[in-house]
Amino acid sequence: MLEVFPAGQCDFTGVFENHGITLYLNGCMDLCQRFEGKVAHTQMRRGNIIVSPAEAPKTFQYRGDSDFLVIHIAPVLLLRLAEEMKGSHSGTVEVLNQFCVRDLQIETLARQLWHEYQTHDLASGICAESLANQFAVHLLRQYSNIGKTAQTPSSKLSARALKRAVDYIEANLGNDLTVGEVARALSMSAGHFAHAFKGTTGIAPHRYVVERRLELAKSLLRQTQLPISAVAMRSGFSTQSHFCVTFQNLTAQTPSAFRRAQ
């Protein structure tokens, strides 16, 4: 789950059900945090990150002109992924508190999720689920008691399994696909499938789906006179606006310009 907070001021104590990742987007915010009897105080700026463990009370006092995102990661997701990772132990998974750190991978993932939120395409299940898995794996590796001993499965998909996955995706491009659905078709866990798919193809499942949807859209634009809104729907995009933005970002043309050029 993603929450967006505008600049302002606040003083509160919270106990969160999920692990939280906070990314500051812009500006400058004066922040004081109290956690487990320790006080931390600094100026938060663009790219600064806080990692907050679930079910541990924290007090925040802040004032400033910085907008920030909070990404919530369910503890059950971390537990499930930890069980699939080589080198993980059978004990509990604890996320470690982090205050005012920089992490380019978290920032990139968070801004990608923020982009999906802004384009109203969080209904794209395969993208949201893939990003959640990437956040969870990174938390396990870098900010947990398991640490870097946790390694994701390195296996690749067999040629037969890859064909089954691709065939399933192609047959459901117009639907709201999730990693879990494709994985179940292969009798695999979602986490294992996502890493094996990327290890085999060099591309994450959600990115592959976007590219295939774009190819389907191009075919419809070339071969039919369907309205752009209908092309977007048949290609699996949740809104026409998101389809147009994605199409232009990846082809440097609007769908209408692409159709005219054909």
Image (spheres, grey):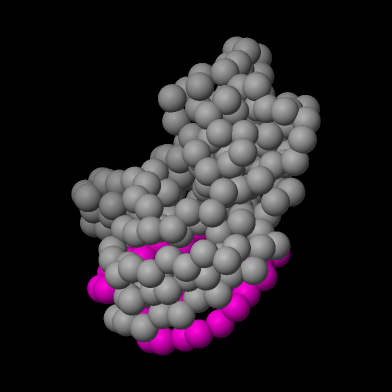
Seen from the viewer's position, the closer of residues 248 and 187 is 187
Using the image as rendered, state which of residue 168 and residue 198 is in the foreground: 198
Q: Is residue 96 magenta?
A: no
Q: Is residue 159 left or right of residue 226?
A: right
Task: Evaluate whether residue 135 shows in this view.
Answer: yes
Figure quadrant of residue 83: top right
Q: Is residue 18 magenta?
A: yes
The residue closer to the viewer here, 226 or 40, is 40
Up the image or down, 214 lies above or below 74; here it is above
Asked if residue 260 can be seen in this view, the reply is no
Provide the major secondary structure of the magenta segment: strand
Query: Which residue shows up at 44% across the image and 58% down it?
Result: 99
- The quarter of the rendered structure image containing the N terminus is bottom right
The quarter of the displayed image where residue 58 is located: bottom right
Q: Which residue is at 28% across, 66% downward?
A: 45
* Point 39% across, 44% down: residue: 105
Highlighted range, magenta: 1-28
> Percent position (x, y) of residue 111?
38, 57
Check the image and report above or below for 212 versus 100: above
In the figure, is residue 225 to the left or right of 138?
Answer: left
Q: Residue at x 30, y 81 (%)?
A: 65
